[in-house]
Image (cartoon, rainbow, N blue to C red):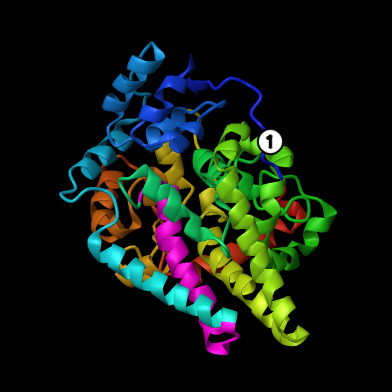
């Protein structure tokens, strides 16, 4: 696997200064895993994205690592006001009790479906990917952003619920939290723009090749197979993705045991039906959960960033929070139902600006977020619903297949 052993001492680069924070690992309020995500790289954006009280975090950093970080960068007022509004939430930023109860119900439904799947129940098979999706996108995704619980250990364990169908967390922390959230829609830095290379391109900034003329079919095939890649292929590709993910060894070493169990669980979904059922039924029970989960995953995630409007270049020096909002497309932000069905991924701008905020807070917080955006001249990208967003996505993919749109 790509879980190479660490070979260099652990250092963090923050605001252009190098810090040695090994002594802080076991004392970090957000847990050692969160701190390891910034190891061996410029962790400035991670530091700013995941701290509700940056001033207090900076004081702790100075106490353990030497010199304090410099004052906020120009243009940070927008993010500062968002943080102030989040701090003012009367019941905190983590999952609400009502949301937790809904997630528990989704968990019970998923467990029942897995039990039925193991017995060969067709109704359980049909419902399985939908119940697993609701559990994973509402619990595992938030937990992977340290947003579901105030307990780092609870978040780490809950993040594992992305298995066995959705994604492998050891790789996901680096792919999603570090690469995608740190460099959204930046070609060469956001690994999400490279998953289909060289067979398809997802941005005008990528050079056009003759094989891209067929990329609509390539992307359509990926919509059906993405979660097989996320769970069983990407964890082995760490050496091939070092350009986008950077230092990965310390995170992989920290998550090796859990990662191995996740790989076994995902492989078992494919293998067990083949051992217990006739071939036609076995193929259905092995492949259907992955195919449907892949379709749900791709439909909900890809439409938010792979859009013409979301990929327009930002002016030089744009603060990262403003750039994140400009690279995200939102829809149905006031609907509790749509927000639960998508795990809050219908409000990607808000999620990218405040990734530590639980999706259960999005509907209530969005009017405040919208008002702050308006005060700071931050334009929101919005559509009426997922269907409209999907239509724009496929139109963009088709346009990128044409040579004349290449830069």
| Magenta stretch encompasses residue 134 | yes
Secondary structure character of the magenta stretch overall: helix
- As drawn, 243 above or below 90: above
- As drawn, 146 above or below 46: below
- Point out the image quarter for the N terminus: top right
Name the spot of residue 345 as percent of width and height, x first.
Answer: 43, 59
Residue drawn 59% across the image and 56% down it: 262
- Quadrant of the image occupied by residue 237: top right
**Left or right side of 107 for 97:** left
Residue drawn 48% across the image and 17% down it: 20
- Quadrant of the image occupied by residue 264: bottom right
Q: Which residues are magenta?
A: 119-147
Residue 91 visible within the image = yes
Name the spot of residue 99 as percent of width and height, x first.
Answer: 29, 64
Name the spot of residue 357 as percent of width and height, x first.
Answer: 33, 49
Residue 379 visible within the image = no
| Magenta stretch encompasses residue 208 | no
Residue drawn 64% across the image and 70% down it: 269
Residue annotated with mark 1: 4
- As drawn, 220 above or below 370: below
- Point out the image quarter for the C terminus: top right
């Amino acid at each position: 696997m790509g879980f190479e052993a660490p070979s260099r001492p652990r250092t963090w680069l923050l605001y252009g200064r190098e810090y040695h924070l090994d002594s802080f690992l076991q004392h970090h309020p957000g847990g050692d895993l969160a701190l390891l995500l910034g190891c061996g790289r410029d962790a400035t954006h991670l530091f700013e994205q995941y701290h509700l009280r940056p001033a207090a975090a900076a004081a702790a950093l100075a106490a353990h690592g030497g010199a304090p970080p410099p004052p906020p960068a120009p243009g940070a007022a927008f993010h500062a006001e968002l943080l102030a509004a989040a701090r003012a939430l009367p019941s905190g930023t983590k999952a609400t009790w009502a949301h937790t109860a809904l997630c528990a119900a989704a968990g019970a439904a998923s467990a029942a479906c897995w039990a039925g799947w193991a017995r060969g129940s067709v109704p359980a098979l049909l419902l399985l990917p939908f119940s697993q999706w609701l559990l994973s996108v509402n619990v595992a995704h938030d937990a992977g952003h340290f947003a579901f619980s105030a307990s780092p250990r609870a978040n780490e364990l809950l993040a594992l619920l992305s298995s066995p169908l959705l994604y492998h967390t050891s790789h996901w922390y680096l792919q999603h939290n570090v690469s995608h959230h740190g460099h959204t829609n930046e070609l060469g830095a956001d690994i999400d723009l490279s998953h289909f290379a060289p067979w398809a391109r997802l941005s005008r900034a990528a050079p056009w090749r003759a094989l891209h003329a067929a990329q609509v079919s390539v992307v359509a095939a990926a919509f059906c197979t993405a979660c097989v890649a996320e769970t069983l292929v990407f964890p082995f590709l760490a050496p091939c993705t070092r350009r986008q993910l950077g230092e990965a060894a310390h995170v992989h070493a920290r998550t090796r045991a859990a990662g191995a169990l996740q790989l076994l669980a995902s492989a078992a979904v494919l293998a067990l039906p083949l051992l217990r059922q006739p071939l036609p039924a076995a193929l259905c029970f092995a492949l259907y959960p992955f195919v449907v989960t892949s379709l749900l995953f791709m439909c909900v995630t890809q439409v938010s960033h792979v859009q013409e409007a979301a990929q327009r270049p930002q002016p030089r020096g744009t603060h990262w929070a403003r750039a994140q909002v400009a690279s995200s497309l939102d829809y149905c932000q006031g609907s509790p139902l749509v927000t639960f069905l998508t795990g809050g991924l219908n409000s990607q701008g808000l999620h990218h600006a405040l990734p530590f905020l639980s999706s259960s807070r999005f509907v209530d917080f969005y009017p405040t977020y919208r008002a702050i955006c308006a005060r700071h001249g931050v334009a929101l990208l919005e559509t009426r619903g997922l269907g409209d967003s999907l239509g724009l996505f496929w139109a963009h993919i088709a346009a990128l297949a044409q040579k004349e749109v290449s830069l």
